[in-house]
Amino acid sequence: MNDLSPFPEPIYVTRPIIPDLSNYMERLQSIWSKKWFTNNGEQHQLLEAKLQSHLKVPHLSLFNNGTIALITACRSLRLSGEVITTPFTFAATPHVLTWNNIKPIFCDIDEKTFNIDSNKLESLITSETTGIMPVHVFGMPCNTEKIQKTADEYGLKIIYDAAHSFGTEVGNMGIGNFGDITMFSFHATKQFHTAEGGALTFNDPALKTRIDLLKNFGIKNEEEVIMPGINGKMNELQAALGLEVIKHAKDEQKKRKKLFDCYLKELKSINGLILPNIEKNIRYNYQYFAIRIEEEKWGISRDEVYEKFKQFNVHPRKYFYPLCSQYACYKQLPSASITNLPVANKIVHEILCLPLYGDLTNEDIEKICAILKSFEKKSN
Ligand code: T4K
């Protein structure tokens, strides 16, 4: 029988990789002696090259965070009018469109992957549509083939929000190779992080110049500013941290896989719990362990489970509740209506992301699962 006493320390949904402090200090020492803190410094250049090869992408540009990166991506492709996106995402995704004066058009999601339903895209395209912004939710790839086909048919650009997808691969391809541009977030809650940070990846070499100009105010040289850019630059302290964190990225992924498999084993065959499924050709990064709790089958709701876990010092997250389409700033949009988004509106009440990070042990996972199972109603 498992010990079901509360965990002595809080168990959060995630914890960041903490690299060796003395190695980080050495990098800081080098920054100090060079007196160079930002604007494409040595650490920045090293990290850009390192990530390009780690993510298996032809071009990469670092940013101070994922949101500014995504704003810049829209600018770089000159998106305007309407862009189709998902309501099941973090606030940043539709907000980025709004900050570009673009109207977000919400498309329903797929029940299995929680990603944008690629079969519903076409019906949302109008003469105003210039692009599609899908999200690889929880690090699971979208149907990139179908999305590309639709985009090609209607001459639309694709910007993938891969905030959760560091290290995910499809076949042997890094997830950052699909669409026109892909955005990664390096926030502390992500598997690879620079405390705050992000990157854009892309195949078109011409975009490298344009994106690097846009993230540095459009400054070409000391006397020429050639476009209205923004300040999206990653600084040397962030890049130095990234160079230490990246050393642990592969190991972290391996540890998470072990814990993920432990969850699958402990929670299998429970009627009313739907577990994540990794398709054969996908190398998943194990960013999240997201389950669906079907109240009518399991007898207890996701919200009750979420609350009960707190008594055991376990803090899972209800990502992404509420749906972006329910925010005050978007709910008046016709595409935000519940009838347009039936799957998203159902699933958003069922998903719970359980704790998953490398510092946990199999015993921790077994205990979290035992606690979860103890919530099951006796009459069920
Ligand atoms: N697109 C998508 C799909 C995204 O998910 C995000 C960000 C973005 C775009 C934008 O990228 P960035 O501009 O952020 O680079 C967190 C993150 O703040 C956010 O970056 C992330 N998505 C989102 C999914 O998660 P919260 O509000 O859940 O964060 P918070 O502070 O509650 O942290 C969650 C847990 O992580 C805590 O309970 C404990 C742990 N934690 C957190 C921090 C900050 C730590 O252990 N250490 C830490 O330093 O949004």
Image: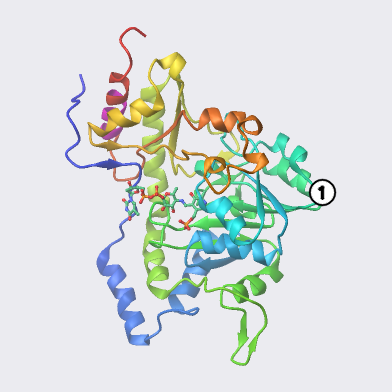
Q: In this image, 3 relative to 179: left or right?
A: left
From the image, tell me which residue sits under label 1: 154
334 vs 31: above or below: above
Position of the N terminus by quadrant: top left
> Three-letter amino acid code at disc 1?
Tyr
Residue at image coords 41%, 39%: 257
The part of the chain drawn in magenta is 363-370
Q: Position of residue 241 (x, y in %)?
A: 37, 66
Quick one: 329 or 268, which is closer to the camera? 329
Position of the C terminus by quadrant: top left
| Helix, strand or loop at mark 1 | helix
Q: In this image, 155 relative to 332: left or right?
A: right
Residue at image coords 36%, 30%: 262
Residue at image coords 66%, 57%: 102
Quick one: 77 or 357, which is closer to the camera? 77
* Residue 106 painted magenta: no
